[in-house]
Amino acid sequence: MIVEISGLKKTYEGKQRVVAVDGIDLNVEPGEIFGLLGPNGAGKTTTLGICTTRILPSGGTVRIAGINVVEHPAQARRHIGIVPQYNTLDRSLTIHENIYFHCRYFGFSHAVAKARTDELLAQFLLTERVKAYPNQLSGGLAQRVQIARAIAHRPAVLFLDEPSAGLDPQSRIAMWDAVMGLRKEGITVVLTTHYMEEADALSDRVGIVDRGRMLALDTPAGLKESFGAQTMLFLKLRNMEAAEPLAAELRQRAGVAKVEVVSDGVRVFVSTGGAYGEGLPAEIIQHCAPLGLRDIAISEPSLETVFIHLTGRDLRE
């Protein structure tokens, strides 16, 4: 395994004790693209911070390429590339210089560093912007430069923290292409993301984290299949006094897997296969219509549906 996480814990002591990571176990195989999903405060960024030696754990171990990141942080960093959540390019340096000096920092000679920089600028379609400064770049271009810089020293693992945050759709797709291209170089990628389509498109496996714990771990398809291909109905009600009686009634209906009362309505998880058929959602909506529905939303099986099923709350809260 290239990334080995065992019993990882992180607690922040103070006036209020905060458990950020609570016993996470995870192994990532060489060449894999692994997605870590969870809401803000779930422990994703803290986990990445420990893996990249920026945060000391309270318990457990992390090994990168067999190296304990706490016992040998400098040695571990030679195998790690990092693209944090925010732009960390040196604004006083050109794109070329940002990558070149990163190579020099990791011990490359002048000639090798220059050749590697030119190679990466071509690979990430940045050659025409070689003399540009970071503040002259769009968010998408800056993100590509950050990825190029992070892999300049040929790390075994690249950690990406919310790589699509703030990018427009076109830049996001370009970033996806760049990440998928890393597989050809044998680089393992561990990323956090709030975008379900991103996890589906990029990840070989996905781990869902909440309150510092790993709730589920599988391929995107496996996660969706494991929850019975359920469709989620959100029924927004005018009169919330009817919500609890309605939820109790729906829980007795064949084909309904789960019902949750939320602040402005009811979430209903139903199975659309087997004996219940595709008509069940329509039957439920028709049954609820006299109660004064304000709005209806239907979500087909997705990673977001799985997340809500596991945690009872929306991923973007």
Image: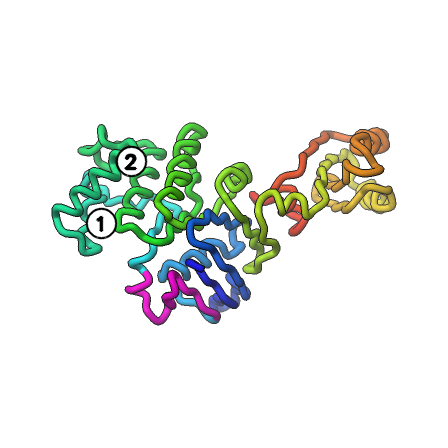
Location of residue 58 with respect to 30 vertically, above or below: below
Label located before the other in sequence (2 or 1)? 1
Q: Position of residue 94 (x, y in %)?
A: 19, 38
Location of residue 129 with respect to 92 vertically, above or below: above
Location of residue 32 with respect to 131 vertically, above or below: below
Q: Position of residue 130 (x, y in %)?
A: 20, 33
Give the label, 2 or 1, closer to the camera.
2
Q: Secondary structure at mark 1?
A: helix
Front residue of 191/162: it is 191
The magenta stretch is: 60-76
Q: Quadrant of the N terminus?
A: bottom left
Q: Position of residue 295 (x, y in %)?
A: 72, 30
Q: CA distance from mark 2 to mark 1?
A: 17 Å
At label 1, which amino acid type do we have?
His
**Residue at the spot of label 2:** 123
Residue 241 visible at all: no
**Residue at the spot of label 1:** 102
Question: Going by the picture, which residue comes out furthest to the left?
Answer: 110
Q: Quadrant of residue 127?
A: top left
* Crowd tier of the residue under label 2, counting other residues whose Cα lies within 10 Å: few below 14, some 14–19, many 20 or above: few
Question: Does the magenta-highlighted stretch encompass residue 250?
Answer: no
Q: Residue at x 53, y 63 (%)?
A: 25
Residue 315 visible at all: yes
Q: Secondary structure at mark 2?
A: helix
* Crowd tier of the residue under label 1, counting other residues whose Cα lies within 10 Å: few below 14, some 14–19, many 20 or above: some
Q: Is residue 200 left or right of residue 240?
A: left
